[in-house]
């Protein structure tokens, strides 16, 4: 298995590192490219007042948006609006350049297959093996068995769990189950990833292995994503670390730099109250943001 637990800086005596561009923060911001998903004035209610009210934001290619907010504020609802599992009452949602707010299900389906989703709590099927859980979408698409095996092994290798191919989820730890759920989301090399509380319920060390996988996917494949988390330390780790392919682990950006394409959204009572960088988040004078950070 790969060195998922090695988070420190490289050993100065080891061979010359093959790191990404120095400090990546010098690279161009993704925000000026055509968005992968864009919400304009989106609202949705169920039985009572709106859960999300007049929400406008976008995700550019290569961008990671970290979605913060208290329990029940509508974070999972927002993710499900992105892939059309829920439809808004009003407003526009553009996905891969197409308006999906009222798109018929049969037209939406091919767009949805381009998105990988890690559901809250992982949501594995206990009656299926790891292979069949990870292959779920490929099985729906009638991909031949031997190709499925190859691609499942590739996805399991990415998350460091090749040996679990024939296991059932019940025999895995919580962190391993979450990594299987991530392999399932990665299997089709998606054009966007939605992570719903991928570290929820995990201990800090296991959470770090999950964050490292997310950093790896972000930096190796540049897949745009929205990530929900309650854990600020996970959010900060995503901003302050990059994946070093040569060491097969994440390392801190030098000189306290941060990834310019990993930015924040925050919801409060159905409203988007923050949209910006880590630096702006830390400087925010919004009392709710301050309370959340403290
Ligand atoms: N399909 C649904 N039907 C009715 N109400 C719903 C539905 N989905 C979500 N809600 C309601 O919308 C609100 C927001 O739910 P959501 O699951 O998005 O919260 P959340 O921010 O993800 O919370 P948590 O941090 O606990 O996961 C809740 O009051 C929830 O009961
Ligand atoms: Mg939720």
Image: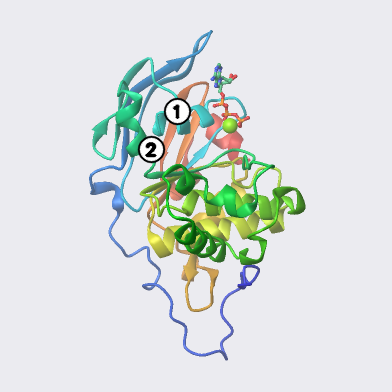
Quarter of the picture containing the N terminus is bottom right
Q: How many marks?
A: 2
Name the foreground residue: 266 vs 105: 105
Q: Secondary structure at mark 2?
A: helix
Please give the residue where the numbered disc 2 appears in the rendered image. Answer: 112
The location of residue 145, given as percent across then percent down, is 49, 56
Q: Quadrant of residue 147?
A: bottom left
Residue 138 at least partly seen = yes
Residue at image position (32%, 65%) is: 26
Q: Which circle's residue, 1 or 2, is located before the other in the chain?
A: 1
| Vertical comparison of 257 with 65: above or below | below
Q: Quadrant of residue 94?
A: top left
Residue at image position (59%, 84%) is: 11
Local crowd at mark 1 within 10 Å, few (<14), some, or many (≥20)?
A: few
The location of residue 164, given as percent across then percent down, is 66, 61
Residue at image position (62%, 73%) is: 3
Quarter of the picture containing the C terminus is top right
Is there a contact, CB below 8 Å, between mark 1 and mark 2?
yes
| Vertical comparison of 137 with 219: above or below | above
Name the foreground residue: 116 vs 223: 116
| Vertical comparison of 151 with 271: above or below | below
Q: Secondary structure at mark 1?
A: loop
Q: Quadrant of ligand 2?
A: top right
Q: CA distance from mark 1 to mark 2?
A: 9 Å
Residue 39 at least partly seen = no
Local crowd at mark 2 within 10 Å, few (<14), some, or many (≥20)?
A: some
The location of residue 42, given as percent across then percent down, is 36, 22
- Left or right: residue 161 versus residue 112 is right
Please give the residue where the numbered disc 1 appears in the rendered image. Answer: 85
The location of residue 127, given as percent across then percent down, is 68, 42
């Amino acid at each position: 298995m790969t060195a998922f637990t090695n988070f420190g800086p490289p050993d100065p005596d080891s061979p010359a590192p093959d790191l990404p561009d120095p400090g990546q923060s010098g690279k161009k911001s993704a925000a000026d490219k055509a968005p992968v998903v864009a919400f304009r004035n989106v609202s949705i209610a169920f039985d009572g007042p709106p859960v999300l009210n007049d929400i406008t934001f976008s995700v550019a290619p290569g961008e990671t948006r970290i979605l913060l907010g208290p329990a029940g504020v509508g974070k999972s609802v927002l993710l499900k609006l992105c892939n059309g599992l829920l439809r808004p009452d009003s407003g526009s949602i553009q996905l891969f350049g197409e308006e999906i707010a009222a798109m018929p299900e049969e037209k939406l389906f091919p767009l949805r297959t381009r998105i990988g989703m890690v559901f809250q709590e992982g949501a594995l099927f206990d009656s299926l093996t790891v292979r069949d859980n990870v292959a779920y979408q490929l099985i729906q698409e009638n991909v031949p068995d031997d190709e499925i095996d190859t691609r499942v092994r590739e996805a399991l290798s990415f998350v460091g769990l090749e040996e679990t191919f024939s296991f059932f989820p019940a025999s895995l730890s919580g962190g391993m189950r979450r990594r299987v759920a991530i392999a399932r989301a990665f299997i089709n090399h998606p054009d966007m990833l939605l992570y719903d509380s991928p570290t929820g319920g995990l201990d800090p060390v296991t959470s770090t292995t999950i964050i490292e996988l997310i950093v790896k996917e972000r930096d190796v494949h540049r897949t745009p994503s929205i990530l929900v988390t309650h854990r600020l330390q996970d959010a900060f780790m995503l901003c302050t670390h990059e994946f070093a392919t040569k060491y097969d682990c994440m390392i801190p950006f030098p000189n306290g730099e941060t990834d310019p394409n990993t930015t924040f959204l925050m919801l409060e009572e159905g409203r988007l109250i923050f949209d910006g960088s880590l630096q702006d988040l830390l400087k925010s004078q919004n009392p709710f943001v301050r309370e959340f950070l403290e």
